């Protein structure tokens, strides 16, 4: 399953439905709706701020990062796509020369004069559900 942040951002329920399909679960319904709700940027940001404010170790708060929190640094940031394209043009051209073909295969363009993300071809959007009882790739 190829899952890109840009696609999750554009269509959270549809992309989580693809993940559910991979796992052999229903692609729509209350569980997917709830997952979309609790993973919304605002919800995650509010949880992060609560953990930091209350100093509750969890997903977003770790005592060793106190100085970073005080400086305003956060794990859950703006949630924007294409932030890597803020690199200087020479850096983008160098990345494109080295990794452009790989990036293009997954629908990304690194050159500054191209659209940053294009829709995935249908072949890369296919979901092949995991067979029940089949070993995971890491177990093979």
Image (cartoon, helix red, strand yellow):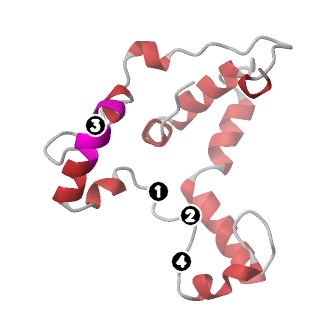
- Bounds of the magenta segment: 95-102
Along the polypeptide, which appears first: circle 2 or circle 3? 2
Q: Residue at x 72, y 20 (%)?
A: 26
Residue 15 image point, x, y percent: 55, 30
- Give the mark, 4 or 1, whose residue is nearer the N terminus: 4
Query: Judging from the image, what secondary structure is the residue with disc 3 in?
Result: helix
Quadrant location of the N terminus in the rendered image: top right
Instruction: Confirm or deny contact between disc 4 and disc 3 (CB under 8 A).
Output: no
User: Which label is found at residue 52?
Assistant: none
Expressed as whole percent of the image width and height from the top left, the position of residue 102 reads: 36, 32
Q: Which residue is mark 4?
A: 73
- SS category of the residue bearing label 2: loop
User: Nearest the camera: 87 or 54?
Assistant: 87
Residue shown at the point (72%, 73%) measured from the top left: 61
Of badges 4 and 1, nearer the viewer stands 4
Instruction: State the residue position of label 1.
Output: 79
Q: Which residue is mark 3?
A: 100
Residue 27 lies in the magenta-colored region: no
């Amino acid at each position: 399953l190829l899952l890109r942040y840009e696609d999750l951002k554009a269509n959270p329920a549809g992309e989580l439905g693809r993940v559910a399909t991979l796992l052999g679960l229903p692609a729509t319904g209350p569980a997917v709706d709830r997952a979309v709700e609790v993973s919304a940027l605002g919800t995650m940001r509010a949880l992060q701020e609560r953990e930091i404010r209350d100093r509750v170790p969890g997903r977003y708060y770790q005592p060793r990062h106190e100085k970073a929190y005080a400086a305003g640094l956060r794990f859950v940031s703006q949630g924007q796509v294409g932030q890597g394209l803020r690199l200087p043009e020479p850096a983008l051209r160098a990345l494109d020369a080295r990794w452009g073909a790989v990036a293009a295969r997954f629908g990304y363009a690194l050159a500054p004069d191209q659209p940053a993300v294009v829709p995935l071809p249908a072949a890369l959007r296919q979901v092949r559900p995991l067979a029940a009882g089949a070993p995971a790739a890491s177990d093979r």
